[in-house]
Amino acid sequence: MTDQAAFSIFDGHNDALLRVWRAGPGGESAFVEGGGEGHLDLPRALAGGMRGGLFGVFVPRPPAEPAPPDMDRAAKELSPPVSHDWAAQVAEEQAAILERLERISGGRLRKALAPGDARAALDGDHLACVLHFEGAEPIAEDLSNLEAWHERGLRSIGLVWARRNAFAEGVPLRFPASPDIGPGLTSAGKELVRQCRRLGMLVDVSHLNYRGFLEVAKEYAGPVVATHSCAHAICPAARNLTDEQLRVIRDTGGIAGVSLNLPDLNPDGSESTVGALGLIARHLEHFAAVAGVGHVGIGSDFDGCPMPEQVPDAAALPRIAEALGERGWKEHDIRRVFRDNWVRVLDQTLSEG
């Protein structure tokens, strides 16, 4: 695999905007110049062949609220909801960070808004960023601000994180557990899914419960994506995808991105890094065996979870491609997983808006 294009990567999910937001003054310059913090910045992305990705806006709880058991793998309850007003404020601040990064990067980072934008970056030398909401709380329940966010550059919405909101209900970060927890989409959630399809926006089912997942597939009537999940058959965490869900994603023409989150990779739900590259490959191979290699991608979750020591940051992403090659994967299939499948879904979805 000597062709650089084979290593061009579109990554289905990261939380870099959240990290920069939390860093405060100086965070944006450090991201562009390479500050060494976290898992992802512009120099490390470009060094690792990452030329595109979904940049998530995630809304943490307000600082005055007591800490819920967000990361408790034995938790039986969802984290508490956050208010729309708080979510709208945080989303505004994080979206503004992406816009400032675009301005100060000297053309090395650009928002992806239209069909072909991701492909141009993957064939070029800059980073294409798709603005994404991880949790739809910044969207008003009556959808009155959805089109304004679309005009602002929003092109992808994950309905939930591990909590409920006006549109849907997630699954707790529970292990072991089934994703068949809680009710389906609300009426507002169904309408949000339909409007996303009309506007040409991705709908992400990561963190969504089973009933909501099935209703998204029905209401969206287009390629459904799970930006950052793993195989429930290997690691039975509630937020991982069952084989049935993988087949539904395949049947919609969508894509499932394998996360590098250790507790979702390891069969015992632990944060062990032993054999992590082999585990990542096993999840990718399982996705490909069930859904077909044309419906598999990478969704790292950089800056949002513990990373394997073998892939500590974006610069190390080619190690996954090397591991797949050592396991007998063909170069054209590795290329599909690392970039072409995401490009296909993005081009199809954005062009239909």
Image: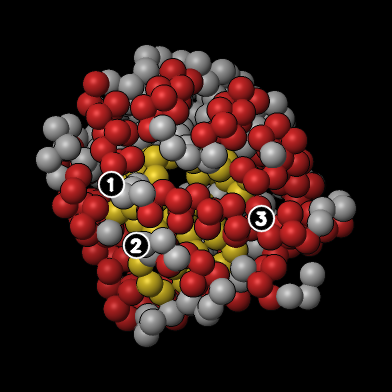
Q: Residue furthest front?
A: 352
- Residue placed most toward the observer, 24 or 1: 1
CA separation, marks 3 and 1? 26 Å
Please name the residue that numbered disc 3 is placed on: 336
Image check: 162 left or right of 89? right
Q: Which of marks 2 and 3 is nearer the N terminus?
A: 2
Asked whether the residues under the numbered discs 2 and 3 touch, taking CB atoms below 8 Å apart as contact, a structural biologist would say: no
Name which quarter of the figure residue 184 lies in.
top left
- Residue placed most toward the observer, 220 or 285: 220
Q: Which of marks 2 and 1 is nearer the N terminus?
A: 2
Answer whether residue 181 is visible to the viewer in this image: yes
Where does the N terminus fall, quadrant-wise?
bottom right
The mark found on residue 113 in the picture is 2
Q: Dot 2, how many residues are within 10 Å of its Cα: few (below 14), some (14-19), or many (20+)?
A: many
User: How is the rendered protein coloured?
Assistant: secondary structure
Name which quarter of the figure residue 221 lies in.
top left
